[in-house]
Amino acid sequence: MKKHQKIDEVSVSEKSGLNVFGNIKSGGAIFHVKGIDDGIEMHKAILYQIAEFEKIPRSWELDILIHNMARELHKKHLADIKSKGVSKKILELLKAPNKKTAQRLARAMILTHEEFANLTFNCGDYGYKKESKFFEYIPDHLKTTEVEKNAFFASTTGKIQNESALKFLRKMSNTLKERKNICAHLFSKENEWHCFYFTYHDLAGKRIIGESHWKGGDHIHYISSLWGKSKEYAWSALSEKSYSVGGEHIKYLMDKR
């Protein structure tokens, strides 16, 4: 059994020529914001893909090996994130003594996806409690019906001629352009709070609708208790269809550039 495990371990992680730790680490900013069980399942999914690529037959021994490897990979990944803490520029923003300073720091900041994800994971080490909320608004004229959905999925690939199926397709296409998906992360400590929020269009405007509504490109928004509002106000404002929260834009990069 031990010999078999060793052979499989080499096959899955080294023989394929794929750096398992590196692949998972590169997407870690997404993985680690989920729970421990979800993180392990993500690692397992990647390992099973590699095993399939290597044509390693599915067996109970392989299942056990991949489960154990996934747990170790996830532990290593979490330890790596933990060691990075929160970037100095974010901490400087969180410690800004007044609104004017916070505005200046936010306007000058370039924040990477990894840096922000590390904040969501490590904020507790700095005394902050994190709350996350997600809001979605789809215009009434783009909401699909069961008839349209069933007609679409019953259509033959490449031969959509049924009018209900075509309506479903058109609505789904326009939904990507017109819907509002708001994601907000609020970090609080006693009477102090900081809220970072964004929509899909904020982060990927050019890729979704062909343009960015901010001259700086991809970005997120920032507002805090220094603006003289309560966090209850921020949550309430973000829950509105035509929300107006205020704050500053922060340039956002999905990679480390």
Image (spheres, grey):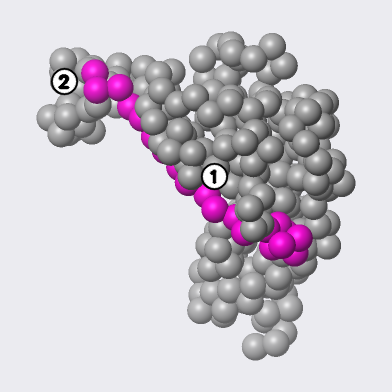
| Residue of label 1 | 231
Q: Nearer the viewer, residue 16 or 219?
A: 219
Query: Mark 2 belongs to which amino acid?
Result: Ser
Q: Which residues are magenta?
A: 122-141
| Vertical relation: 149 (above or below) 184 | above
The residue lying at 48 percent from left, 44 percent from top is 232
Q: Which quadrant: the C terminus?
A: top right
Q: Nearer the viewer, residue 141 or 171?
A: 141
Q: Position of residue 184 (x, y in %)?
A: 54, 41
Q: Which quadrant: the N terminus?
A: bottom right
Question: Mark 2: which secondary structure?
Answer: helix
- Determine if residue 212 is in view: yes
| Residue of label 2 | 164
Which label sits on residue 36?
Answer: none
- Asked if residue 40 lies left or right of residue 192, the reply is left
Q: Nearer the viewer, residue 245 or 114?
A: 245
The residue lying at 49 percent from left, 39 percent from top is 233
CA gap, disc 1 and disc 2: 44 Å
Question: Mark 1: which secondary structure?
Answer: helix
| Vertical relation: 36 (above or below) 21 | below
Query: Mark 1 belongs to which amino acid?
Result: Lys
The residue lying at 76 percent from left, 45 percent from top is 94
The quadrant holding residue 201 is top right
- Asked if residue 176 lies left or right of residue 186, the reply is left
State yes or no: residue 22 in magenta. no
Residue found at the very far front of the displayed protein = 228
